[in-house]
Image (spheres, coloured by chain):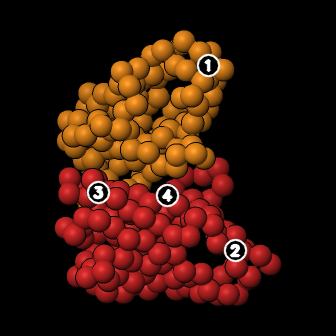
Chain colours: A orange, B red
Amino acid sequence: DAGVIQSPRHEVTEMGQEVTLRCKPISGHNSLFWYRQTMMRGLELLIYFNNNVPIDDSGMPEDRFSAKMPNASFSTLKIQPSEPRDSAVYFCASSRARNYGYTFGSGTRLTVV
Amino acid sequence: GENVEQHPSTLSVQEGDSAVIKCTYSDSASNYFPWYKQELGKRPQLIIDIRSNVGEKKDQRIAVTLNKTAKHFSLHITETQPEDSAVYFCAAGGSQGNLIFGKGTKLSVKP
């Protein structure tokens, strides 16, 4: 298994531009999580899906952030418009079931200038 | 809300010494407690986990203990080596099946 696959690995964009991050979970895992990591705030859960349905999006910072999971093998996290304070590493993770360990992707390092 | 407190935030030990990281959780219904290791610039990776029907689990130089009554659990690393240097995160299974993470402990092992 290739693990959780995220793209792109690095993204540099200008303030105001739309950014789309992509994630392919491990086949057979039915839970998918989006995290943001910064030095100041650590690992923050943004949103998670169970069987492609959003369960908790209370961690999404504001309306500029949106996430979708159209099928079991693909999810996107979109930021529109992006701001410099959105600069962080964004991790996607998947899990086979409730209360099982997560497998994290390699992350996307986002820089908004 | 559900919360996981992790201490210390930084820990420096001499190679060969032991390191202990402690976490407390708030949700008494939590029954799954994994630990993750994150090396600089890399993803968090699961290193060991424990469920509430077990009080202790060991895997070579690492062990985890759980005290459900006190709602705390700990990671123990013995005979530390420079390659153990990383940020370690504890987590507790939340009521909705997601994991609640601690803030992390930066462990430095000095040769």
SS at badge 4: loop
Report the residue at 36% width, 33% height from top.
A60
Circle 2 residue: B12
Left or right position of A100 against A4: left
Residue B77, compared with residue A33, is above or below; it is below
Circle 3 residue: B2
Point out which mark residue A13 bears. Answer: 1
Q: Residue B69: where, in percent of width, then height?
A: 25, 82
Q: Given this view, does label 4 or label 1 mark the residue nearer the observer?
A: 4
Chain of the residue displaying label 1? A
Residue type at mark 2: give it. Answer: Ser
Alpha carbon distance from label 1 to label 3:
35 Å
Residue type at mark 3: give it. Answer: Glu
Sequence-wise, the earlier of marks 2 and 4 is 2
Chain of the residue displaying label 3? B
Cβ–Cβ under 8 Å for marks 1 and 3 = no
Q: How many marks?
A: 4
Cβ–Cβ under 8 Å for marks 3 and 2 = no
Alpha carbon distance from label 4 to label 1:
28 Å
Circle 4 residue: B103
Alpha carbon distance from label 2 to label 4:
17 Å
Count residues near mark 1 (Cα–Cα under 10 Å), then give few for <14, some for 14-19, many for 20+. some
Q: Given this view, does label 1 or label 3 mark the residue nearer the observer?
A: 3
Chain of the residue displaying label 4? B
Q: Residue B11: where, in percent of width, then height?
A: 64, 72
* Residue A107 visible in the snapshot: no
Cβ–Cβ under 8 Å for marks 1 and 2 = no
Alpha carbon distance from label 4 to label 3:
14 Å
